[in-house]
Image (cartoon, grey):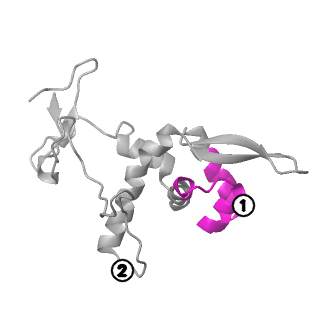
């Protein structure tokens, strides 16, 4: 197994170009409008015109982003019909899209902490009212601080190392 962590790590032992999950994820959601459409979908927006208005983008851009997010499996089209109108599609988060939301919330929290913020928005646990945070935990439940987070290159078919 190759560890890709730390200032002395041999970064030339393996190239992440085209293989890195960050790169692949950014290819799907790497636009501001894609992230904001996901935010809106989480908040309950489903209709094309509402996405365009709430995100502040053109209808052409809305159409392109929605198609990309559907193709990536983050949103699903669901037909609906208003009385007297033709059938149209609305867009809802898939399970995959919901699993991506901690990334969006982490960006929300980072922006709230590190950028000028005139809003009073915060993430909160609705049941008790306490602030909610995004954190990294290992599968055994331990909080993992940045200095303890490593990236490992596993051999194909190899089980993760246990420590």
Looking at the image, which residue is at 12% across and 52% down? 147
Is 45 a magenta residue?
A: yes
Label 1 secondary element: helix
Residue lying at 51% horizontally and 61% vertically, measured from the top left: 32
User: N-terminal of the two: label 1 or label 2?
Assistant: 1
Give the CA distance from mark 1 to mark 2. 30 Å
Checking the image for residue 63, the label placed there is none
Secondary structure mainly formed by the magenta segment? helix
Q: Is residue 25 left or right of residue 87?
A: left
Q: In which quarter of the image is the C terminus?
A: top left
Drawn side of residue 92 relative to residue 122, left or right: right
Q: How far across and down, in percent of the image, does residue 97 sit?
A: 49, 44
User: Looking at the rendering, which quadrant does residue 109 occupy?
Assistant: bottom left
Residue placed under numbered mark 1 in the picture? 49
**Disc 2 packing (10 Å; few <14; some 14–19; many ≥20):** few
Instruction: Verify CB contact (< 8 Å) between mark 1 and mark 2.
Output: no
Residue 126 at x, y = what percent?
Answer: 39, 59
Instruction: Please identify the quadrant where the N terminus is shown.
Output: top left
Secondary structure category for the residue under label 2: loop
Instruction: Specify whether 52 is left or right of 80.
Output: left
Which residue is located at x 58 percent, y 55 percent? Answer: 44
Residue 68 falls in which quadrant of the image? top right
* Residue 116 tag number: 2
Viewer-closest of 40 and 131 = 131
Check the image and name the residue furthest to the right.
84
Q: Give the range drawn in magenta.
A: 40-67
Q: Which one is nearer the viewer's eye here, 4 or 122?
A: 122
Residue sticking out furthest to the top:
157
Label 1 crowd (10 A; few <14 / some 14-19 / many >=20): some
Q: How many labels does the image show?
A: 2
Q: Where is residue 158 in the image (x, y as percent from the top left)?
A: 23, 19
């Amino acid at each position: 197994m190759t560890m890709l962590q730390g200032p002395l790590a041999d970064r030339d032992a393996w190239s992440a170009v085209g293989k890195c999950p960050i790169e692949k994820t950014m290819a799907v959601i790497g636009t501001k409008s894609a992230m904001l459409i996901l935010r809106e979908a989480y908040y309950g927006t489903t209709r094309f015109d509402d996405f365009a208005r709430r995100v502040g983008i053109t209808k052409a851009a809305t159409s392109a982003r929605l198609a990309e997010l559907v193709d990536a499996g983050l949103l699903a089209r669901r037909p609906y019909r208003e009385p007297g109108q033709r059938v149209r599609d609305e867009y809802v988060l898939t399970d995959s899209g919901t699993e991506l939301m901690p990334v969006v919330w982490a960006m929300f929290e980072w922006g709230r902490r590190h950028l000028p913020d005139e809003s009073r928005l915060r993430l909160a646990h609705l049941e008790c009212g306490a602030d909610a945070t995004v954190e990294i935990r290992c599968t055994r439940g331990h909080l993992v601080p940045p200095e303890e987070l490593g990236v490992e290159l596993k051999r194909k078919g190899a089980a993760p190392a246990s420590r």
